[in-house]
Image: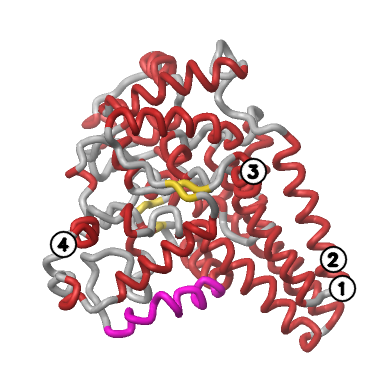
């Protein structure tokens, strides 16, 4: 977690990572201090200085954080003394790992469409139920165990946990839905248009249909992207340079990707041959990729949360996080998605154990109601996905007919809907 902050302004990451921010700040004060000029003379470049709102500047966040601390964490014996807000019950990630191992064994020994679909589901579950929380820092109190759990992303679904950490922590969570600073808002363009400020093309009319086909290609796309980044002279994800990562960890990421390809592709081909593996491969990668992409993309891409292209205009970090995210389901959905379903709570407390989000949701909803902040929630993933498809259709409509000057003079989607 600290490696991610090397060579950059890490204010948002630091403040959002600690439920007991007062305690963390006191400890921070005990560390040696240097002037920026002194460190820059040694060759360090801190890049862009933080200009966006930060958690500690948000009265809404401070109110929610303190209530969660008193009403959710302390009654469970967490965030007290040496006890942190980290640590998911072992059976949460244990159930995911056992199910994945069973599915992998079935697929390798008896490949079929059915075993492929099941393996695709479990790979998605590893991605959401284990690696997501582990690479955020909330899965286990033992940091070595947590690091190993995070590496299941490399071995299971085949994504690089190292690339994911930089992408997710440094960019996406700090600047959710910002069209310039959050890669999730622009990295799929020009194939998929997710923001009214992006240049419209005629083929976007059909993105609500073909986007789901593209989701099925998430696995090969991830492999190519990861290798391009990891094998580059200076690893970089959309302007986020891996300044705190040594060559050994980058080499480990490449080795683990090789092991992933060996067990999921090479071994089945060696045992059963190419013809026997065609449809099972389509099932595991197609369904698994579509399901995982759908789980992530619905959280920030529906009409109700796309109303601004400029985070600095909000002036309140918590309000920005809440109003540009959606939540669906509850405690059961949280178990099967690793807390990814309660995206609003996760964005407010990204490093907290995900089994606590259902309890935190009550506090967040209550404060939003009191302070007039819009809280967008759905009963199930299906309802969220339906609204996402409607959003893709709306973003694919010709701008001239929708009141947008072809991406050059964008209006707010929320205003458009109201009109």
Kindly state the secondary structure of the residue where label 2 is placed.
helix
Residue occupied by mark 2: 106
* Residue topped by disc 1: 110
Provide the secondary structure element on which disc 3 rests: helix
Q: Which residue is mark 4?
A: 411
Residue at 20% over, 37% down:
315
Position of 342 compared to 417: left or right? right
In this picture, which residue range is highlighted in magenta? 202-217
Please tell me whether mark 1 sits on a helix, a strand or a loop. Answer: loop
Q: Earlier in the sequence, mark 4 or mark 1?
A: 1
Residue 256, percent from left and from top: 66, 58
Q: Which residue matches tag 3?
A: 332
Q: How far apart are labels 2 and 1 at the CA level?
A: 6 Å
Query: CB under 8 Å between callouts 1 and 3?
Result: no
User: Is residue 226 shown above or below 144?
Assistant: below
User: Could you say where residue 131 lies in the image, as x and y percent from the top left?
Assistant: 61, 47
Q: Quick check: 188 above or below 337?
A: below
The mark closer to the camera, 3 or 2, is 3
Query: By what rule are the colours in the image chosen?
Result: secondary structure
Q: Earlier in the sequence, mark 4 or mark 2?
A: 2
Which SS does the magenta portion mostly show?
Answer: helix
């Amino acid at each position: 977690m600290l490696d991610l902050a090397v060579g950059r302004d890490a204010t948002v990451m630091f403040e959002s990572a600690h439920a007991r921010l007062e305690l963390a700040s006191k400890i921070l004060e005990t560390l040696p201090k240097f002037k920026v000029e002194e460190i820059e003379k040694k060759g360090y470049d801190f890049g862009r200085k933080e200009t966006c709102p930060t958690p500690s500047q948000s009265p809404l966040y401070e109110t929610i954080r303190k209530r969660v601390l008193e009403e959710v964490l302390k009654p469970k014996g967490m965030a007290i003394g040496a006890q942190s807000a980290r640590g998911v019950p072992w059976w949460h990630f244990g159930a995911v790992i056992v199910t994945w191992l069973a599915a992998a064994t079935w697929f390798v020994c008896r490949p079929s469409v059915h075993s492929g679909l099941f393996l695709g589901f479990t790979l998605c579950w590893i991605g959401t139920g284990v690696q997501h929380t582990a690479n955020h820092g909330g899965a286990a109190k033992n940091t070595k165990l947590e690091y190993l759990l995070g590496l299941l992303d490399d071995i299971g679904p085949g994504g690089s946990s190292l690339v994911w950490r930089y992408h997710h922590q440094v960019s996406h969570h700090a600047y959710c839905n910002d069209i310039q600073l959050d890669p999730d808002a622009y990295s799929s363009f020009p194939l998929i248009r997710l923001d009214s400020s992006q240049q419209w093309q005629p083929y976007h009319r059909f993105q609500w249909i073909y986007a789901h086909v593209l989701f099925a290609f998430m696995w090969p796309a991830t492999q190519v992207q990861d290798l391009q980044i990891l094998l580059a002279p200076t690893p970089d994800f959309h302007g986020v340079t891996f300044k705190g990562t040594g060559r050994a960890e980058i080499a480990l990421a490449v080795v683990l990707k090789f092991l992933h390809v060996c067990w999921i592709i090479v071994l089945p081909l060696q045992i059963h041959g190419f013809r026997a593996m065609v449809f099972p491969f389509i099932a595991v990668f197609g369904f698994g990729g579509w399901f995982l992409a759908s789980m992530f993309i619905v959280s920030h891409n529906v009409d109700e949360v796309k109303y601004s292209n400029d985070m600095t205009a909000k002036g309140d970090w918590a309000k920005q996080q809440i109003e540009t995210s959606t939540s669906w389901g509850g405690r059961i959905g949280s178990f099967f998605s690793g807390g990814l379903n309660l995206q609003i709570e996760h964005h407010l407390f990204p490093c907290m154990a995900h089994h606590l989000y259902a309890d935190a949701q009550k506090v967040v909803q209550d404060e939003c109601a009191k302070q007039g902040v819009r809280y967008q929630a759905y009963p199930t993933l299906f309802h969220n996905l339906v609204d996402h498809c409607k959003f893709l259709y709306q973003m694919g409509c010709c701008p001239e007919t929708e009141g947008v000057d072809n991406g050059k003079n964008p209006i707010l989607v929320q205003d458009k809907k109201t009109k």
